[in-house]
Amino acid sequence: MTRHFLTGAELTKDELNRLVERALELKRDRLASRALEGRSVALVFEKPSTRTRASFDVGVHELGGHPLVLRGDELQIARGESLRDLALVLSRMVHAIGVRTGPHEAVEELARHAGVPVVNMLTREHHPCQALADLVTLRERFGRLDGLRLAYVGDGNNVARSLVILGELAGVDVAVSSPPELSLDGRPAVSPENAASGAHALYADVWVSMGDEDDTELKRELLTPYRLDEALMAHARDDAIALHCLPAHPGEEISEGLLYGERSAVFDQAENRLHAQKALLELLVG
Ligand code: CP
Ligand code: NVA
């Protein structure tokens, strides 16, 4: 049966733990696997990307495969061709399809019609590849996942939702602190300080996600008290790390000092996208 990775909930706890360990093995020996030898992976981008695009492109290459990067605005879907037909056609040519788009229903539609694995490279609702890499970063820093405490502070968005789904599957206690107007799926309000108290990691994301630009002023106003800065970090454990999925706006959702300082694991997170997604592609395609 074709396996997809749309929210992360497709994985069992054991599979998730094995993926995290495999990602760290591949980090130690980047060219250890040729799982995609002679295979191609389509990477469809309907939205901008730096990390996701670079990490999937390089990752497929390092696994011996061919990355086929396709911009949505250059495909016939921009002129009305259906996602169903895109899925049917690409499935005849490639061995997996990665998609970054707006509505989550779009990746579900592709997956319904694809004969090869579909990987969600970000939708408005979910960003599971990011959360997978974040678990690799936590495992790398703390030597375990089970029992860790992660506090996400900010908009109740795609990144927050994926951290909850994958974090909880891995045994990480994920607290989400958002203004009530931006709460994640109606979760009860918790203050940033309460969420941060005793946490191993504090996590921030942009205040304004892709596609939310119409709400920029409102979000800035609501999210100003939900910044990840040194004062909030003082509530976390002494060995706590600062996380951010990037792109960052230093001085807004995260202080410059935390982003670039000693407690930052942010650029490890970015690098771990590569290793985590290689492990994922091995599982789905290899
Ligand atoms: N974190 C992340 O997905 O970054 P990009 O939008 O640059 O891919
Ligand atoms: N929440 C952000 C994540 C970017 C990687 C967005 O959707 O734009």
Image: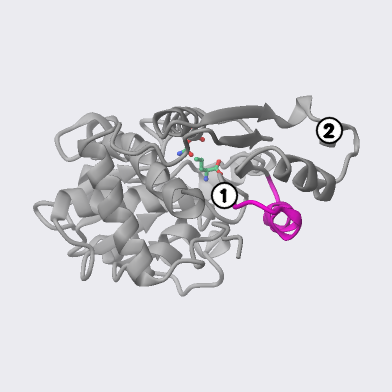
User: What's the magenta bit mostly, secondary-structure-wise?
Assistant: helix
* 161 up-or-down from 99: above or below: below
Q: Residue at x 24, y 53 (%)?
A: 138
Q: Which residues are magenta?
A: 102-117
Which of the two discs, 1 and 2, sits closer to the camera?
1
In the rendered image, is residue 119 in sight?
Answer: yes
Classed neighbour count for the residue bearing mark 1: other residues with Cα under 10 Å, few (<14), some (14–19), many (≥20): many
Which quarter of the figure has residue 142? bottom left
The answer to which image quadrant residue 210 occupies is top right
In front: 269, or 242?
A: 269
266 or 189, which lies in front?
266
Q: Secondary structure at mark 1?
A: strand
Amino acid type, mark 1: Val
* Image spot of residue 49 (x, y percent): 54, 31
Up the image or down, 166 lies above or below 286; here it is below
Q: Position of residue 224 (x, y in %)?
A: 43, 46
Looking at the rendered structure, which numbered label has been put on residue 223?
none
Q: Which residue is mark 1?
A: 119
Q: Residue furthest bottom?
A: 188
Residue 232 in view here: no
Q: Answer left or right for 243 relative to 100.
A: left
User: What amino acid does circle 2 point to?
Assistant: Ala
Residue 220 or residue 29, whichever sits in front: 29
**Residue 78: numbered disc:** 2
**Residue 101 placed where, x, y %?**
67, 43
In percent of the image, x 45 and y 66: which residue is there? 11
Q: How is the image coloured?
A: one colour
What SS does tag 2 mark?
helix
- In the image, residue 114 sits, relative to residue 253, either above or below, namely below
Question: Is 107 contained in the magenta span?
Answer: yes
Q: Residue furthest front?
A: 38
